[in-house]
Amino acid sequence: MPPHTQATFRALADPTRREILHLLSAQDMTIAQVAEQFTMTRAAVKKHLTVLSDGGLIEVQPQGRERVNRLRRDGMKPVIDWLTTFDIFWDDRLAALKSAIETYEAPDD
Amino acid sequence: MPPHTQATFRALADPTRREILHLLSAQDMTIAQVAEQFTMTRAAVKKHLTVLSDGGLIEVQPQGRERVNRLRRDGMKPVIDWLTTFDIFWDDRLAALKSAIETYEAPDD
DNA sequence: TCAATATAACACCAAATGGTATCACAACAG
DNA sequence: CTGTTGTGATACCATTTGGTGTTATATTGA
């Protein structure tokens, strides 16, 4: 359904990127702050952030000379959507989950 | 939590492999049957199936001289598990979903 | 044995990953 | 205003990984 399902799956395929998402789930961070948590360079981290952004999983907010990276709450919806297409083995409890997520949507961003 | 979370995410990152999973959700298939649906060679398909197997998403059942590939119902559980670690933005409706899925488990394989 | 199928072993090309510069720009001190 | 500094962006390069094909080698049923 979403146009960037592939980009989302691709973004999640890398363990570093999944870890970055966890970091961002705790708080918004600049590139430098994210890079501090890894042994990689800022440039390398920046590339991961770009992939995450392409996958709709984060958004970037310019703030002075910094750019704050923020987790997009509904960025993983494409994944959930895809998972729920397996209605054969995902029984109706999962269907309930899907509708719960769809009810969710973005709060008041 | 599952040891092969990375393998599962990696397996899902490729669109061909996701399509294969959809095919297998309709019915069990041999490599040849899967390969019919694509323009790739059997060998190429086989490699995708190996990746899917590594990710715990399918299982292979020898049947005579053929090997039937079958979707593993709970193979995507690592993904769900990972998604539900984001309890900050996945509110308690998702938590309910998680417990529902955990209640699920394999029926009577 | 023969035919069909599955698997293994290579090779090739594209893409992903990460490093090192380097550049642009905003913030700030003087 | 001017120069310095920190931050992010970008370009280039090397290495690795992934996807696919081709070919060769089992394995199995008849």
Image (spheres, coloured by chain):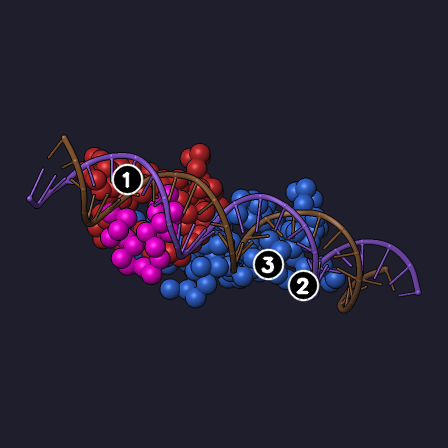
Chain colours: A red, B blue, C purple, D brown
Of all chains, the one bearing label 3 is B
Which residue is at 39% across, 41% downward? A55
User: Which residue does the image show at 28% across and 39% down from the upper left?
Assistant: A60
**D26 in relation to B36, above or below:** below
Q: Say which chain tag 2 marks.
A: B
Counting residues from the start of the chain, the first of labels 2 and 3 encountered is 3
User: Which residue has dot 2 on it?
Assistant: B62
Q: CA distance from mark 2 to mark 3?
A: 15 Å
Residue drawn 51% across the image and 59% down it: B55
State which quarter of the image contains the N terminus of chain B.
Answer: bottom left
Q: Amino acid at mark 3?
A: Thr
Q: Which residue is mark 1?
A: A60
Label 1 is placed on what type of residue? Val
Say if residue B28 shows up in the picture: yes
Q: Is residue A46 magenta?
A: yes
Q: Main secondary structure of the magenta part?
A: helix
Residue at mark 3:
B50
Q: CA distance from mark 1 to mark 3?
A: 38 Å
Chain letter of mark 1 equals A
* Image spot of residue C27 (x, y percent): 14, 40
| Percent position of residue B19, x then y | 56, 44
Does A94 lie within the magenta span?
A: no
Mark 3 burial class by Cα count in 10 Å: few <14, some 14-19, many 20+:
some
Circle 2: residue type: Pro
Q: Which mark is residue A14?
A: none
> Element under label 1?
strand
